[in-house]
Image: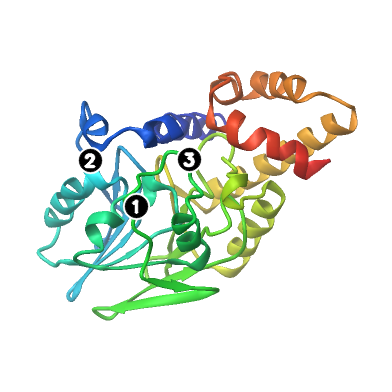
Amino acid sequence: MRSLISLLASVLLVLGAASPDALAQSPSKQKQGRPPLGMEKITDDLFVIIGNGGNVGVLVTDEGVVLVDDKFEEDYDGIIARVKSVTNQPVKYVITTHHHSDHSGGNTRFIEVAEIISHKNARANITGGKQPGAPANLKPARITFTDETSVFLGGKEVRARYFGRGHTNGDVIVYFPAQRVIHTGDLMAGLTPLIDYAGGGSLVEWIKTVDAAMAALDFDRVIPGHGTVTNRAGLQTYRDNVVKLRDDVAAQIRQGKSQEEIRAALATQFPTVYGNPNSMQNRWSLPGFLTELR
């Protein structure tokens, strides 16, 4: 457990780079001091690009490349460079896990060379301006789906499934069945989940969504929205901790505790999250917890 908490703490540090304030900056400001992107091998044909925004899944086939998420617009060249380090094949498809621009910002460039796919709610969230500080030129997907869709390329399948609301109302889990790997997007990211209520998210539904995905999908490894690749047991522990968070907050609400008292109690457990008054969890999630769990 101690090692998992250390792992999730490192995830949180990465997640902090995608604050609404950071997303509101101009691309030129975002580029200043940005570290180069890294890449890790998961299987012979599946990689993850790390750094700056959300994790990017990279499936290499003989007919082209499928990406899962595409970070910020200004990371386009870095993503292309990393892809070219493992294959000469072009990017043909990008599946975005949700609408936040640290995962879909690259759509602005990739839409010129590849097909962008997302859940229909993620597209609606982009066209409806549901993210504070998102770039005005953020491009939505041209192809959407409701429950499930697959990309078949070079004899390989990438499957995107919608299990319900969670981080937002448009989160999809992307499944690589042959590789036994899933990409969760921001359903898994940080010490506790960031629930974007303005974007249709729900703490209660998050648990149901993750439970449904774990029951339906046969996988060994997990690419989270931010942070280090983990395994099925890591996602299970993360899920169990979210259930405890829900129960703890609900108990404090029943005791008549105020939002500030609940925040202070959470800060003793998660000082880097709830100890910071300006954290995204305090601004986006905690007020919604109190409304949803009353």
Q: Quadrant of residue 269?
A: top right
Q: Is residue 45 left or right of residue 125?
A: left
- Residue 179 tag number: none
Looking at the image, do the residues carrying marks 3 and 2 touch, with CB atoms under 8 Å apart?
A: no
Query: Given the image, on which type of amino acid does mark 1 rest?
Result: Leu
Question: x%, y% of residue 19?
Answer: 44, 33
Whether residue 5 is visible to the viewer of this picture, yes or no, is yes
State the CA–CA distance, disc 3 to disc 2.
25 Å
Residue nearest the observer in this picture, 1 or 97: 97
Q: Quadrant of residue 163?
A: bottom right
Residue at 77 percent across and 33 percent down: it is: 249
Residue at 69 percent across and 54 percent down: it is: 205
SS at mark 1? loop
Residue that label 2 marks = 37
In which quadrant of the rendered image does the C terminus lie? top right
Residue that label 3 marks = 132
Residue nearest the observer in this picture, 66 or 112: 112
Q: Is residue 21 left or right of residue 50?
A: right
Q: Is residue 143 above or below residue 257?
A: below
Question: x%, y% of residue 240?
Answer: 67, 44
Residue that label 1 marks = 138
